[in-house]
Amino acid sequence: MQSLWMIAASLLFACMGVCVKLGSVQFSAAELVFYRGLVALLLLYAYVSIAGLSLATRHWRTHISRGLAGFFSIVLYFQAIAMIPLAMAVTLNYTSPLFLAAILVYWQRERISVRLLLALAAGFLGVVFLLQPSWHSEQMAGDLLALASAITASIAYLNVRKLGELGEPEWRTVFYFSLIATLGGLPWILVGNWNDQPLHAIDARGWLLLLGVGGFGSLAQLCMTRAYKHGKTMVGASLTYSTVVFASLFGIWLWDERLPMIAQFGVALILISGILATTYSRAAPAEQD
């Protein structure tokens, strides 16, 4: 059942990416981030209210650190999805476990094994292969944004790990992330409105896409949380990389996005090294943005 829950989460995260890419034609990145947080916030608040759970916490500083890192990560990620092929954006975003392992070694002074070192080296080599076809193209800005989203996501995961060690439940962590994402996105779109970039009118298609961005993201988090709660952490973390497979299929189906052979080799290297790095590292992400 854990595998089914994790595969469902990966499919839902890929569906969220599709909605973001489709929605980027109609909405700004600021609007997508704001509505992503707002829809998730409302859904989670309804769940908390119905279940009679408490949102009180003594670890608000860590929640703020996690929320801010996650907010900036999702801003960069959504912008990258609008600029480059979906499969490439998702793959580069999923290099976060590689950066997380590197951060654990550098900041936390955790010992690194030769196996983990080789996995990290293979992963970053995969990034080079993936970026090489677009190194001098218009996609370079989107590539760098996706990589930056992975780096900030790894910082968010480090705080997720700390919150888990402090005994904070996953739903509370996700709730405060959604709250910070909503509050962070609101002034961004207001500033855009003052600079003659008014909010876009939302038609029926727009509402469906915005609900898809927030709804698919929230459902994916719930499925992933359930998978981690009832299964082995390393198995679940490895299966998260199936999001790249689903994103690639959606990209081919909807936009005829076909990566060059060398880029496909880079994707394979990143997938394999990410799974190995997650397995060899003592910290695996507990949930995705």
Image (cartoon, grey):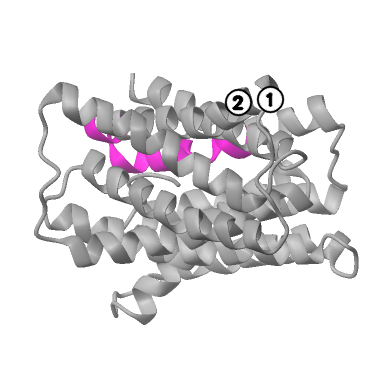
Give the distance between the C-alpha atoms of the residues marked 1 and 2, in whole angstroms.
6 Å
Quarter holding the N terminus?
top left
The residue shown at (77%, 47%) is 264
What secondary structure is marked by label 1? loop
122 magenta-colored: no
For the residues bearing labels 1 and 2, Cβ distance under 8 angstroms: yes
Callout 2, which amino acid? Trp
- Above or below: residue 215 compared with residue 165: above
Callout 1, which amino acid? Asp
- Above or below: residue 189 compared with residue 44: below
Q: Position of residue 51 (x, y in %)?
A: 14, 24
The residue shown at (80%, 52%) is 263
243 magenta-colored: yes
Main SS of residues in magenta: helix
Point out the stretch of residues depicted in magenta: 227-245
The residue shown at (20%, 56%) is 163
Q: Residues within 10 Å of mark 1 (few under 14, many from 20)?
A: few
What secondary structure is marked by label 2? helix
Q: Quadrant of residue 95?
A: bottom right
Q: Quadrant of residue 245?
A: top right
- Above or below: residue 285 compared with residue 170: below
Q: Position of residue 289 (x, y in %)?
A: 45, 47
- Residue farthest to the right, as pictured: 137
Residue beneath disc 2: 207
Between 100 and 232, the one nearer to me in the picture = 100
Residue beneath disc 1: 203
